[in-house]
Image (cartoon, helix red, strand yellow):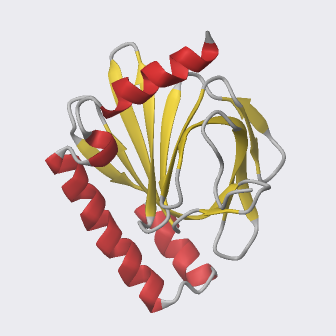
Amino acid sequence: MSGYPVDGEIIQIHSYKHNGMIHRIWEKTLVLKGASTYIIGANDKTLVTEADGRTWVTREPAICFFHAKHWFNIIGMVRDDGVYYYCNLSSPFVWDEEALKYIDYDLDIKVFPDMTYILLDEDEYEWHRKEMNYPDVIDRILKNNVKKLISWIQERKGPFAPDFIDKWYEKFQSYRK
């Protein structure tokens, strides 16, 4: 038994809110690379269950990047017209044999195939920050990580590197054959 999921394993992803309540569950994600500091996964047409019990199914293949030290995760959605990224400001992930888990902190950055981006949900973040009493240190960490994420986008670092999604999507395809 390792401290993280192994390549080829199917796992669940559980997203929580700061108050400990479940936010969202992704039923099945294939681990493409499991390591102690990061996990790269992939899913396509996977069932997602919302906190209120509503469900939906993802529309396109996605490559997911989770890190144990950074306060964000990055989802690259493979579409016909290019890769769209959805970046969640979140706690670093933890793995506990049941699922990969993280706290979702509302702020999101959507990145388009041409690498332009928009910061989303600032109002929701401010509202939850007050409602759930996010400590000032968390607020500072998250705002610093927004800056770090933007620099990754601008520098084409990590999952934003030109061949990153292609490489992992190819590996995902090989598992599906």
Please say if 30 is above or below 102.
Answer: above
Please say if 108 is above or below 146.
Answer: above
**Which residue: 43% across, 43% down?**
86
Please say if 173 is above or below 104.
Answer: above
Please say if 6 is above or below 138.
Answer: above
Residue 108 visible from this viewpoint: yes
Residue 26 visible from this viewpoint: no
In the image, is 18 to the left or to the right of 76?
A: right
In the image, is 19 to the left or to the right of 41?
A: right
| Residue situated in front as seen by the camera: 176 or 122 | 176
Q: Quadrant of the N terminus?
A: bottom right
- Residue 17, quarter of the rendered image: bottom right
The residue most toward the top is 177
**Which residue: 21% across, 40% down?**
116
Instruction: Tell me residue 145's x, y (percent).
Output: 34, 68
**Which residue: 53% across, 78% down?**
129
| Residue situated in front as seen by the camera: 35 or 46 | 35
Instruction: Tell me residue 120's x, y (percent).
Output: 40, 53
Instruction: Tell me residue 118's x, y (percent).
Output: 30, 48
**Which residue: 76% across, 68% down?**
21
